[in-house]
């Protein structure tokens, strides 16, 4: 073999032995195989050789290149393996004999209350439904007798997905959906998330409602009162104070809101001499809106208001959870602090 090539090979071998990191390895590669490297250099001065000699030198040079390339690749693998081993060695000791953390998760208080609501209404013969959170303007407003430019539609309150498509601002679109696909009698509840552009101590941009609808012949306001009172006694205990106030919703007539005595101040309106911040001093917390289904809504879904009557209601799940568990700040439901959530295990 050409002496020059042989010398190159052995100098490369001894340099390679000393390499201890990838940066130096790359420098070595450039030094030998680079465009201005030693191997290219060795081919210079071939002009004086015979054709036969040129062939031999060319072949030997190529063999040298291959040998160097292979040696570099092997060294790279070895360096990588060393690095990995160093990282593994640096890891903290892991004791596989330690028992795993067996702390159990718990249901979110909203889930617990939602399920209880479902349970109580199921026991009264209602079915439980679920449906989309993204609904059409028609379902959310128009069909519920909330015409264009009604204050309830204000951009301040509604989150629009696109033109004519909204994040439902209440669960009431369920009423229309259900009646469009089903003939009376109807007795249905539907829990779910609703969205409004609202954020303060008693309002969050997303919260939960449980919608209820019952339609049949001869349904009266007394049935509404009886059903909701039975529900609230079941959820809050038989000595909870409940009151109904006349109210207004475009899709019910007459309409009412129901309040329950405030959990924070026990209905007194103040705590240690300061105004109760949960009920704002009134001693009552509004937990639902309700009413008799407006004949206009029946007409929109093709029910005959001369034939059937019905009631509807929308419960605020967070409000119920606050009352049940004595939680003073609505925001705690959404912060997901495990110290808070763990208390519901
Ligand atoms: N959808 C109303 C609200 O979100 C509540 C409601 C439901 C009122 C059903 C009457 C009947 O405030």
Image: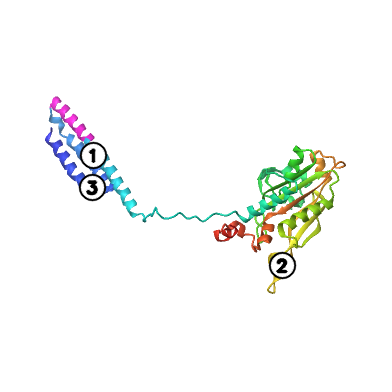
Q: Residue at x 25, y 47 (%)?
A: 24
Magenta span dominant secondary structure: helix
Rendered-image quadrant of the C terminus: bottom right
Mark yes or no: residue 147 visible. no
Q: Which residues are magenta?
A: 50-66
Q: Nearer the viewer, residue 124 or 48?
A: 124
Instruction: For label 2, count other residues whose C-alpha is less than 10 Å away and answer few (under 14), some (14-19) or many (20+).
Output: some
Query: Can you say whether 51 is above or below 23 in the image?
Result: above
In the picture, the disc for residue 19 is: 3
Q: How many angstroms separate mark 2 from mark 1 (CA)?
A: 82 Å
Rendered-image quadrant of the N terminus: top left
Q: Residue furthest bottom?
A: 273
Instruction: For label 3, count other residues whose C-alpha is less than 10 Å away and answer few (under 14), some (14-19) or many (20+).
Output: some
Measured as percent of width and height from the top left, residue 322 is found at 67, 60
Q: Quadrant of residue 65?
A: top left
Q: Quadrant of residue 41?
A: top left
Instruction: For label 1, count other residues whose C-alpha is less than 10 Å away and answer few (under 14), some (14-19) or many (20+).
Output: some
Q: Residue at x 18, y 42 (%)?
A: 13
Measured as percent of width and height from the top left, residue 55 is found at 17, 27
Q: Viewed as shown, does residue 247 lie left or right of 70?
A: right
- Residue 61, magenta (yes or no): yes
In the picture, the disc for residue 71 is: 1
Count every numbered label the image shows and give the total: 3
Q: Viewed as shown, does residue 281 lie left or right of 13?
A: right
Q: Residue at x 60, y 58 (%)?
A: 344
Q: Nearer the viewer, residue 289 or 221?
A: 221
Q: Is mark 1 within 8 Å of ligand 1?
A: no
């Amino acid at each position: 073999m050409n002496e020059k090539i042989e010398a190159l090979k052995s100098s490369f071998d001894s340099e390679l032995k000393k390499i201890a990191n990838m940066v130096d390895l790359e420098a070595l590669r450039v030094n030998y195989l680079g465009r201005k490297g030693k191997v290219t250099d060795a081919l210079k001065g071939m002009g004086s050789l015979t054709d036969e000699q040129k062939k031999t030198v060319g072949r030997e040079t190529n063999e040298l290149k291959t040998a160097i390339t292979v040696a570099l690749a092997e060294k790279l693998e070895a360096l990588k393996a060393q690095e990995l081993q160093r990282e593994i060695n640096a890891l903290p000791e892991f004791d596989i004999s330690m028992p795993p953390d067996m702390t159990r998760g718990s249901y979110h208080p909203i889930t617990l209350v939602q399920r209880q609501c479902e349970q109580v209404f199921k026991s009264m013969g209602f079915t439980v439904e679920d449906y989309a959170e993204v609904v059409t303007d028609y379902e959310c407003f128009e069909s519920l007798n909330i015409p264009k430019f009604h204050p309830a539609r204000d951009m301040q309150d509604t989150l629009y997905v696109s033109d004519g498509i909204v994040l439902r601002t209440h669960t009431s679109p369920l009423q229309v959906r259900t009646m469009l696909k089903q003939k009376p009698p109807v007795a249905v509840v539907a829990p779910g998330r609703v969205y409004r552009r609202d954020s303060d101590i008693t309002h969050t941009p997303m919260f939960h409602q449980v919608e209820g609808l019952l339609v049949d012949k001869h349904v009266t306001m007394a049935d509404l009162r009886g059903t909701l009172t039975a529900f609230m006694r079941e959820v809050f205990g038989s000595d909870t104070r409940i009151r109904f106030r006349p109210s207004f919703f475009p899709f019910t007539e007459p309409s009412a809101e129901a309040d329950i005595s405030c959990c924070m101040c026990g209905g007194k309106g103040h705590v240690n001499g300061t105004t109760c911040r949960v009920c704002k001093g009134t001693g009552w917390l509004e937990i639902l809106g309700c009413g008799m289904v407006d004949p206009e809504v029946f007409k929109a879904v093709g029910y005959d208001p001369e034939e059937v009557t019905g009631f509807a209601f929308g419960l605020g799940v967070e409000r119920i959870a606050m009352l049940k568990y004595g939680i003073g700040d609505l925001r705690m439901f959404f912060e997901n602090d495990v110290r808070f959530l763990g208390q519901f295990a």
